[in-house]
Image (cartoon, grey):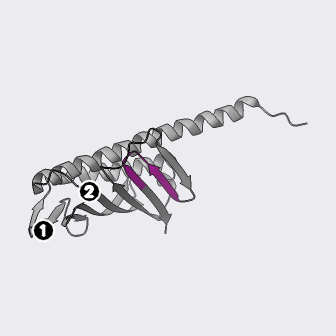
Amino acid sequence: MCRLHPYKSSEKIQEGETKKRQLKYRMGQLEDLLNEMTEKVKEKAGIYEIEEYRAFIGLNCNKRDDKSIQCEYNIKKYLYKEDNIIKCYSDSQHSSYEIECTHYSYESSFVLSDSHSFIKNIENLILSIYNTLEPGVLMLMGKSHINISTVAFMNPNAPIKKNLEISKDGNLLRYNGSKYKIMIAWQFY
């Protein structure tokens, strides 16, 4: 006769709740970092308000022989206010840790200060979020590569939500914050 251990199921529930809290915390950190980047762009462009922003971040990572994780990145961020559009872009193959922004309404460009730290912090946070979801998988992936795609939307005029929502469905993580929506998807190849 098999006996069920009531503590096992409560431990699993507690473990799941702890993971959920950690994910909400890390997603909040990503939210804060993207917001800080937005504020720097607004300041540099001389814009005081935006209607929304959209960020698209792609990481292609593999494990190196020394067991560290190496990633190539592609970051695009768009800020919108009526007819004003600012596009910020960085790509590991072309821009060497610089985020270049183009203000299309004024046909001007600028490089965002602190670009290197924004890029490294974004990369580290996304890897940390994935590692919270799938502990240890990055270190066990052998010669495989992983592509992690992140999409973030922010609407400063959205109503504030009291309950932040987070859900995982297969290889997709969804986060619905108060003014932010973030989706992270991943696949190995």
- Packing grade of label 2 (10 A; few <14, some 14-19, many >=20) is some
Mark pair 1, 2: CA separation: 15 Å
Q: Is residue 130 left or right of residue 16?
A: left
The answer to if 173 sits in the magenta stretch is yes
Q: Residue at x 31, y 60 (%)?
A: 54
For mark 2, what is the residue?
51
Span shown in magenta: 171-182
Q: Residues within 10 Å of mark 1 (few under 14, many from 20)?
A: few
Viewer-side residue, 27 vs 66? 27
Q: Mainly helix, strand or loop, the magenta region?
A: strand
Q: Any magenta on residue 174?
A: yes
- Disc 1 element: loop
Residue 59 lies, in percent from the top left, at 36, 62
Q: Earlier in the sequence, mark 1 or mark 2?
A: 2
Please identify the quarter of the rendering in which residue 112 is found: bottom left
Q: Which residue is mark 1?
A: 105
